[in-house]
Image (cartoon, rainbow, N blue to C red):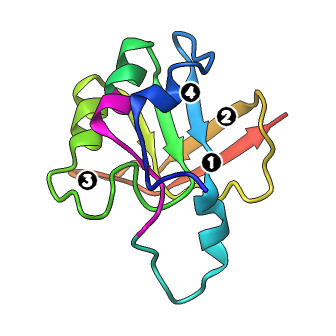
Amino acid sequence: MISPAWIASTLTDLDIRCSERVLFKTNNSELWDQTGKVASDYVALTKDAAQLLVHRGVQAVGIDYLSVDLPDRSDFPVHHTLLDSRIAIIDGLNLRHVGAGEYFLICLPLRLADAEAVPARAMLLR
């Protein structure tokens, strides 16, 4: 099982090229089956992992649970690192039935005035 936090060293060997959208399917995908309960030990990114994604030129980062930040981080270092570099964050993805590979991502956020986050419909095409 992957530790609750992904650090940059975990991502270093991945072939992440400039202008990519990166979606992380982790052990979190299994958590969606736990109805009525929010997990507190889900997999998230660390600030150094976010900095590596910024350095690699990623444009959007998605993860298969509630947040790219760990639940005990009320200062949201990953959110700030990514958003300060104008990298979109897509939290709460259901990737249970998605295999590894390259996809075409369609993400249609709602336009809401004065919102710091908005719901979106996200779809992957092979």
For the residue marked with disc 3, what is the amino acid?
Ala
Q: Is residue 21 left or right of residue 91?
A: right
Q: Are marks 4 and 2 in contact (CB under 8 Å)?
A: yes
The magenta span reads 41-50
Question: From this viewpoint, which residue is outermost toward the right?
Answer: 126
Q: Residues within 10 Å of mark 4 (few under 14, many from 20)?
A: many
Instruction: Measure the alpha-carbon separation of dots 3 and 4.
Output: 23 Å
Between disc 3 and disc 1, the foreground one is: 1
Q: Nearer the viewer, residue 92 or 77?
A: 77
Looking at the rendered image, the quarter that the C terminus falls into is: top right
What residue did someone put label 4 on? 21
The residue depicted at 21 percent of the width and 38 percent of the height is 80
Residue type at mark 1?
Ala
Number of dots carrying numbers: 4
Calculate the distance from the C-alpha at mark 2 to the C-alpha at mark 3: 23 Å
| Secondary structure of the residue carrying numbered label 4 | strand
Q: Which residue is mark 3?
A: 115
Q: Report, in whole angstroms, how far the alpha carbon at label 1 lies from the one at label 4.
A: 12 Å
For the N terminus, give its image quadrant: bottom right
Give the residue at mark 1.
122
Measured from the top left, where is residue 83 in percent x and y? 28, 33
Which residue lies under the disc numbered 2?
A: 105
Please say whether residue 43 is one of the residues in the magenta stretch.
Answer: yes
